[in-house]
Amino acid sequence: MDSIKLLGTSGDPMERAIVEGSMEELGGILSPYADIWARYVFSTRLGTGEFVKDGCVDFASSHYTALIRAHNALGFYNQIKSLCEVGDLGSDGMLLLELQANISAYWWALGALVDNLGQTLENFPGSTAVGLQDAGLKLLKAENAHMKYLYERRTQLIHSRIVPITVHADRAVFDYRYLDGKRREVLPASTEWKTEFTTPGEVGIFYSERWVETKRELANAWHAVRRILDSYASRKTDAMNWQKIVEQPRIVYPSFMTASSACASVTLPAPSGTGRPPGGSPF
């Protein structure tokens, strides 16, 4: 049985639901996720899988949460698409509020996902990043520049300010400012709002492009995480020789007791929301 099929039959209820309902959108992410889960989580589970052995809790929960964040982001993206198909958003304050909330939640979910993947690297038994502040996050961002972009968008959304400017042709026009001038020397790279939109269609196109790009890069990042974890696992230890597992031509799972003992011992466009002084975006 391959890893995704195993996850779809033996994962917890949310993992099974994601495999069943989101393969088309998240299949590229589910492939490396399921490989990691099958190799390093499945055999350490307790009961029906809602818990794992103590030494693996931080690693397994970080990895699991990253998948949930990916599914959250997909949901927020679908909401953004639906709202952009409504028509004239500029004169409807409630729809604008809903769009803004989903845009913010989209980037928050993706930024949190990057954080969780970094923690997956830090918390894996045998990790060389353990005990070093944000070492896993730094390693992940070094492996994949898009992860840095996503993480900075989350930071930007948390600290941005929404400044109403005017109403132009029945559309509300905003300027979105990140912190203030006296703090600019400490801002992360690529955190200026630069993209402008004048129609909901432009917002929809922007997010469709970002989602396709982000799905691809998340899959690449997850494969990198898998390679790094395999390199950690390949080190021989008194508790367990993970190398024996990952070198098999097919998936071979360690026994529950064996795995339990081992665990015990690119400048991209800014997001929407970018308004400019009169003549700028209503979004």
Image (tube, grey):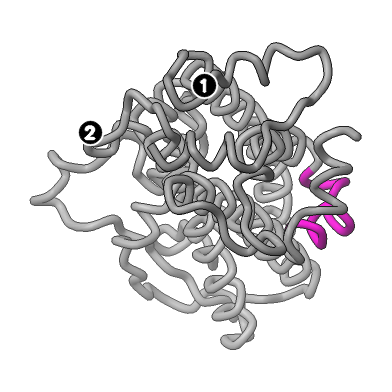
Residue 90 in the image: above or below residue 273: below
Residue 132 - label? 2
- Check disc 2 and report its element: helix, strand or loop: loop
Depth check: give the residue in front, 279 or 219.
219
Which amino acid does the dot numbered 2 rest on? Answer: Leu
Which residue sits at x=43%, y=68%? 174
Q: Magenta segment, which residues?
A: 15-26
Q: Are marks 1 and 2 in contact (CB under 8 Å)?
A: no
Label 1 belongs to which residue? 233
How many numbered tags mark residues here? 2
Q: Nearer the viewer, mark 1 or mark 2?
A: 1
Which amino acid does the dot numbered 1 rest on? Answer: Ala
- Check disc 1 and report its element: helix, strand or loop: helix
Our reading of the magenta stretch's main secondary structure is helix
- Residue 106 in percent (x, y) is at 57, 59
Crowd around label 2: few <14 · some 14–19 · many ≥20 (10 Å): few
Among the 4 quarters of the image, the one containing residue 237: top left
- Residue 268 in percent (x, y) is at 50, 33
- Residue 184 in percent (x, y) is at 16, 44
Residue 115 in the image: above or below residue 109: above
Q: Is residue 20 magenta?
A: yes
Image quadrant containing the C terminus:
bottom right
Q: Earlier in the sequence, mark 1 or mark 2?
A: 2
Image quadrant containing the N terminus:
top right
